[in-house]
Image: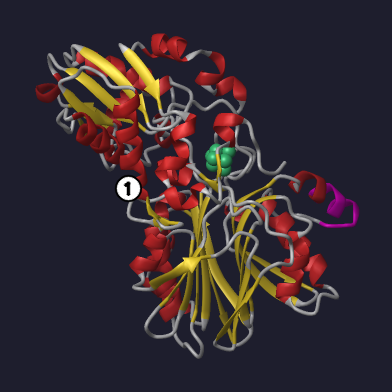
């Protein structure tokens, strides 16, 4: 058992960072990329990498592990150049954990070199992979990012430029992709026509162009947020100039992943005009309005449930209490299943504060229930600590469908809400009551995106692209 899985959370696959400064020398941009990746570490803890371009050649370093484990001063000092791209990765189902699958994916092909960083998932990757295999392609990795790389390399022949190759590829690739691509002399940034995975753009005072999955990474390198990369847009930075290119692949209705607001993104990031922390607070307020509970305290499963629990407390007038202590160092412990029960593994991470919960009627706010395995343990732990009643409020609708866009929402058979009604789930997890955020209320959590659209396919089955 890997204890990161202990908490039964779904995970984002990747975080991206790219920076360009005309005439930059030394390892300054690699160091900035290191800082940006540290800020994006929550989006992937399995592997990471940085590539730079120096004198029209790409150099890189990548490995399994956290950013601070993979890089040290000496490695960063060796990554000198005037452009850098970086990636943090967590592999979703079907993608093997291996160094070869770490990104940036650096490709040598007929037209030179490319370093590719990808967040998302290509839904027609298998079809394209087979087609390219029949044409003689040999793969080094098991990722769909390599399929993107092949597509771009094939389209580059006769395309005239790397950005034209990306345009052409966007007509072939289906699914979710935010891309930061570095050729030896330019950065090319692209977002799929639905904008399923986030990507934003900022500037530093020194003239550096910065791109990142989330605005918290722009803040970390002291870059000013300029705007989101638009769905279907391609941005090119070369010779110190930026060009914005749209309209080539037909923009579709925007379908940003709603789960960025609910769970994936850092609370201090702003996505499409909405601070993520505020979105989470709104979920709590809506829960308090629509499904109140008679209780003495409101608490949360730290950390992701905290803003929603505070919103619930604010709206209901029931005091918010830190009902759980969290072991922040238990996150990456690898434990064999025979060495520890699931309950012990959960206890290793979270411990109910007996003094606060004993004899109390408690509202517990969490962001989601996936398989339900951890939630039942949490309820039992609270009862063992003397809780009088446990009322669960979930800041998202029930997961009913898998995700095909680069997260690990699992298949139907593992989703507890696919197997049971709300009452049935409540019974299985042993709570006194259970309520979820209403589907109709979802757009209220990010008002600026409401009109352009959000993906909610894991709750509704309405997939924007298949
Ligand atoms: S299916 Fe769910 S998790 Fe996947 S992109 Fe859509 S909203 Fe996000």
- Image colouring: secondary structure
66 or 193, nearer to the observer: 193
Q: Residue 258 in the image: state x and y as whole percent.
A: 49, 43
Q: Residue 321 in the image: state x and y as whole percent.
A: 16, 32
25 or 429, nearer to the observer: 429
Q: Regarding mark 1 in the picture, which secondary structure is present there? A: helix
Is residue 77 part of the magenta span, yes or no? no
Q: Residue 384 in the image: state x and y as whole percent.
A: 21, 13
User: Which residue is found at the position 61% from the left and 27% from the top?
Assistant: 411
User: Which residue is found at the position 63% from the left and 31% from the top?
Assistant: 461
Query: Where is the N terminus found, in terms of image quarters?
Result: top left
Query: Quick one: which residue is furthest to the bottom in this view?
Result: 23
Residue 280 visible at all: yes
Task: Left or right? Give the position of 156 relative to 420.
Answer: right
Quarter containing ligand 1?
A: top right
Position above or below: 267 against 153: above
Cβ of mark 1 under 8 A from ligand 1? no
User: Which residue is found at the position 31% from the left and 34% from the top?
Assistant: 284
Query: Where is the C terminus found, in terms of image quarters?
Result: top right
Task: Left or right? Give the position of 464 relative to 160.
Answer: left
Is residue 136 part of the magenta span, yes or no? yes
Chain part drawn in magenta? 129-137
Q: Residue 309 in the image: state x and y as whole percent.
A: 26, 34
Query: Quick one: which residue is furthest to the front in this view?
Result: 451
Task: Left or right? Give the position of 111 relative to 453.
Answer: right
Task: Left or right? Give the position of 322 relative to 168.
Answer: left
Query: Quick one: which residue is furthest to the right in this view?
Result: 135
Residue that mark 1 sits on: 278
Position above or below: 367 against 135: above
Judged by its main secondary structure, the magenta piece is helix
């Amino acid at each position: 058992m890997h204890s990161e899985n202990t908490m039964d959370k779904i995970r984002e696959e990747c975080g991206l960072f790219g920076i360009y400064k005309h005439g930059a020398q030394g390892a300054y941009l690699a160091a900035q990329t290191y800082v940006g990746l540290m800020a994006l570490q929550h989006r992937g803890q399995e592997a990471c990498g940085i590539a730079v371009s120096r004198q029209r050649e790409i150099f890189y370093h990548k490995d399994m592990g956290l950013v601070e484990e993979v890089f040290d001063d000496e490695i960063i000092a060796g990554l000198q150049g005037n452009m850098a791209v970086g990636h943090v990765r967590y592999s979703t189902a079907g993608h093997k954990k291996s160094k070869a699958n770490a990104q940036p994916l650096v490709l040598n092909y007929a037209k030179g070199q490319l370093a590719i960083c990808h967040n998302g998932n290509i839904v027609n990757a298998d079809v394209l992979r087979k087609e390219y295999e029949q044409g003689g392609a040999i793969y080094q990795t098991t990722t769909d990012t390599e399929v993107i790389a092949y597509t771009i390399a094939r389209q580059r022949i006769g395309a005239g430029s790397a950005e034209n190759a990306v345009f052409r590829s966007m007509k072939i690739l289906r699914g979710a992709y935010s891309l930061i691509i570095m050729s030896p002399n330019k950065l090319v940034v692209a977002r799929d026509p639905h904008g399923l995975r986030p990507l934003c753009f900022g500037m530093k005072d020194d003239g550096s162009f910065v791109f990142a999955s989330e605005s918290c990474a722009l803040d970390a390198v002291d870059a000013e947020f300029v705007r989101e990369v638009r769905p279907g847009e391609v941005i090119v930075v070369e010779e110190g100039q930026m060009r914005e290119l749209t309209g080539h692949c037909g923009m579709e209705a925007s379908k940003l992943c709603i789960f960025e607001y609910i769970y994936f993104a850092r609370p201090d990031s702003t996505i499409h005009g909405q601070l993520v922390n505020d979105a989470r607070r709104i979920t709590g307020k809506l829960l308090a309005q629509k499904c109140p509970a008679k209780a003495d305290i409101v608490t949360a499963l730290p950390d992701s449930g905290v803003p929603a629990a505070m919103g619930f407390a604010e709206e209901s007038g029931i005091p918010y209490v830190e009902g759980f202590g969290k072991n922040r160092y238990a996150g990456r412990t690898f434990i064999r299943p025979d060495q520890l029960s699931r309950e012990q593994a959960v206890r290793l991470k979270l411990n109910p504060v007996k003094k606060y919960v004993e004899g109390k009627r408690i509202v517990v706010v969490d962001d989601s229930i996936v398989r339900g395995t951890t939630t039942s343990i949490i309820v039992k732990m609270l009862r063992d600590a003397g809780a009088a009643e446990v009322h669960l409020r979930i800041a998202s609708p029930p997961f009913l469908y898998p995700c095909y866009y680069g997260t690990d929402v699992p298949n139907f058979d593992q989703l507890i809400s696919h197997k049971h009604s709300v009452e049935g789930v409540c019974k299985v997890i042993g709570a006194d009551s259970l309520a979820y955020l209403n589907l109709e209320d979802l757009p209220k959590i990010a008002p600026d995106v409401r009109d352009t659209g959000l993906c909610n396919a894991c709750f509704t089955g309405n997939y924007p692209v298949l």
